[in-house]
């Protein structure tokens, strides 16, 4: 009698899953962008908070479905955006995003991850995001490899 066993997968293998972007999901208040899983459950939300008194206090926050902040984005003086862990303000910088190309049909962003660039004098681009807002699509590259397509 032969025995068969289930295939063994490495513990750190990422499991791909689809997220669907919506502004009109029934569980979202007006003006909030949401990301739902294939069952229709909201997984993440994006809140924008614009301060009327000062541009430097405008921010966007990526929240877990329960409303806890995962990442907060703040505009920087040079036109870039900086992403901080949680609602951390200036404490836990994770990444910086700089727009390098804006054309009518295409936008390119360079993403600099702080942990990848620690100890280096000048930041090096870790990810490149190339997208088209008319087609509502973008591709994320690490070097010449595609990491994700939306």
Image (cartoon, rainbow, N blue to C red):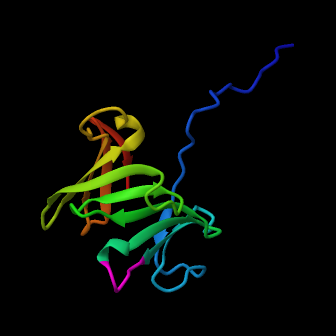
Left or right of residue 78, residue 103 in this image:
left
Identify which residue, 69 or 130, lies in the foreground.
Answer: 69
Q: Residue furthest left?
A: 103
Q: Residue 106 occupies which quadrant of the picture?
A: bottom left
In magenta stretch: residue 122: no
At x 87% / y 13%, what residue is drawn? Answer: 1
What percent of the width, then of the height, locates residue 89?
46, 62
What percent of the width, then of the height, locates residue 40?
60, 68
Left or right of residue 62, residue 98 in this image:
left
What percent of the width, then of the height, locates residue 43?
59, 63
At x 24% / y 69%, what residue is drawn? Answer: 134
What percent of the width, then of the height, locates residue 60?
42, 70
Type of secondary structure dominating the magenta stretch: loop
Left or right of residue 137, residue 65 in this image:
right
Q: Residue 127 occupies which quadrant of the picture?
A: top left
Write down the region rendered in magenta: 49-54
Position above or below: 48 against 2: below
Quadrant containing the C terminus in the rendered view: bottom left
Identify which residue, 119 or 3, lies in the foreground.
Answer: 119
Q: Residue 26 occupies which quadrant of the picture?
A: bottom right
At x 52% / y 63%, what residue is drawn? Answer: 87
């Amino acid at each position: 009698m032969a025995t068969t066993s289930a295939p063994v997968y490495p513990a750190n293998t990422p499991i791909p899953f689809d997220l669907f972007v919506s502004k009109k999901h029934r569980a979202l208040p007006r003006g909030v962008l949401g990301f739902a899983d294939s069952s229709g459950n909201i997984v993440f939300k994006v809140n924008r908070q614009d301060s009327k008194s000062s541009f430097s206090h405008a921010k966007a926050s990526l929240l877990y479905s329960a409303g806890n902040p995962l990442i907060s984005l703040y505009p920087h003086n040079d036109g870039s955006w900086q992403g901080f862990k949680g609602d951390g303000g200036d404490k836990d910088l994770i990444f910086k995003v700089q727009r390098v190309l804006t054309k009518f049909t295409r936008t390119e962003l360079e993403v600099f991850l702080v942990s990848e660039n620690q100890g280096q004098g000048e930041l090096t681009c870790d990810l490149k995001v190339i997208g088209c807002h008319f087609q509502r699509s973008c591709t994320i590259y690490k070097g010449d490899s595609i990491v994700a397509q939306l």
